[in-house]
Amino acid sequence: MSERLLVTFNPGSSTVKIGLFALEGGAPRRVGRGMIDFRTAPLRFELSEGPDRFDVTLEAEPGSEMHKVLNESFGRLAWHFNLSQIEAVGHRVVHGGDTFSGAVRISQRTLADLDRLTTLAPLHQPQALRLIRAIARLRPELPQTASFDTAFHRTNAELTRRFALPRALHEDGVKRYGFHGLSYKFIAGELARRHPTAGEGKVVAAHLGSGASLCALENGVSRDSSMGFSTLDGIPMATRCGALDPGVLLHLLSEQKRSLKDVEDLLYHFSGLLGVSGVSADSRELLASDRPEAKEALELFAFRIGGETARLAATLGGLDALVFTAGVGEHQPQIRASVAKRLAWLGLSLDEAANAANAEVISATGSRIAAFVIPTDEEQVIADEAASLLSTKD
């Protein structure tokens, strides 16, 4: 394949998704996707090219320097793509703070700014920085760009972003930022394209995956989010706790004498669906389980989503539509139905058959609130933003 290519990296806490896009005219067009899974030993590299799928093991060991992992992964990609045609690399970066309100080209100054933001996203930011530096080492001639999960929420009002803490802390950056912005940007665009009337209204989008959050959209613009200062906030997630009384933290640190690292691990890795169920962080396994703890974890998940949807509706001053997206939101009708049941008082009712089929429109005829299932594509947003930056003259 000799098309001009753009590569995107979308790092999570334990995986890196790789997108390959052709740049031949118009918007970047996806031609392949891959994933490096750091949870396995040996490391696994999954690749799909159209209908073909490949799953290979890497010689690089978990904990290896990132440039070694990428060098081997690029070697595998070269079997299917002409990597000499890569023109740029785009990265998802979780935290842009108040420094970045949109995608940027990466420079030494940009890297220094991103380094300073690491304290605001200690589990996610370092992974993105390692990828950026690894690409700079392997292919120093390639321009790189950064797309930020926080940038989409910069339209939130200052009042929305403020905690009831001393003003000096707000000025020091202790404020609500919001995350999953690349997903919400994609959903806002898709909703406007597929259902323009709904896209112009008051919408809550629910990004429900291993990480999960909700966003209040008004005419496609972010007005509020369930996540605030960190990716721990809001609704429960696979292993993250969601909103928590800060008094619990004081208790764990003072009365139980837990270390800061122990508390951090508890909140990020051993809470949420896993913590409540004691069974699994995977909602599919919980749905299949007959243990009452598994059922309770899912009920708590839906209960908190319903409550947070109502709070975001208050921010918007009403609610016209609800959009489900990401792995759980797109593929699990039982969870969508459970959420909808808790929002029936707002006038939401689902078409059972449409919901069971994961149809695009799942609201029942006569439902006051429209409900949609729309797949998200964060890598497409990264590619679009990178291509736009590349086309801009310095």
Image (cartoon, helix red, strand yellow):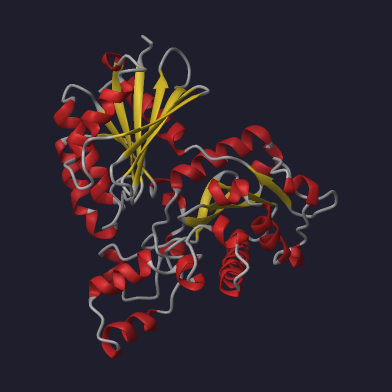
Q: Is residue 79 above or below residue 92?
A: above
Q: Nearer the viewer, residue 31 or 141?
A: 31
Place residue 287 in its image quadrant.
bottom right
In this orientation, which residue lies closer to the viewer: 375 or 285? 285
Question: Residue 106 at x, y = what percent?
Answer: 23, 34
Q: On the rendered image, what quadrant is the N terminus found in?
A: top left
Compared with 24, 362 (above or below) is below
In the image, residue 200 above or below residue 87: below
Q: Which quarter of the rendered picture does the C terminus lie within?
A: top left
Provide residue 85's location: percent of width, then percent of height: 30, 14
Residue name at image x 52 percent, y 54 percent: 223
Give percent across and percent down for residue 195: 69, 37
Using the image as rendered, state which of residue 189 and residue 142 is in the foreground. 142
User: At 61% from the left edge and 47% from the top edge, which residue is drawn?
Assistant: 331
Which corner quadrant of the image does residue 342 belong to?
bottom right
Residue 199 in view in this figure: yes
Does residue 200 appear anywhere in the picture? no
Residue drawn at the location 17% of the way across and 21% of the way down: 141
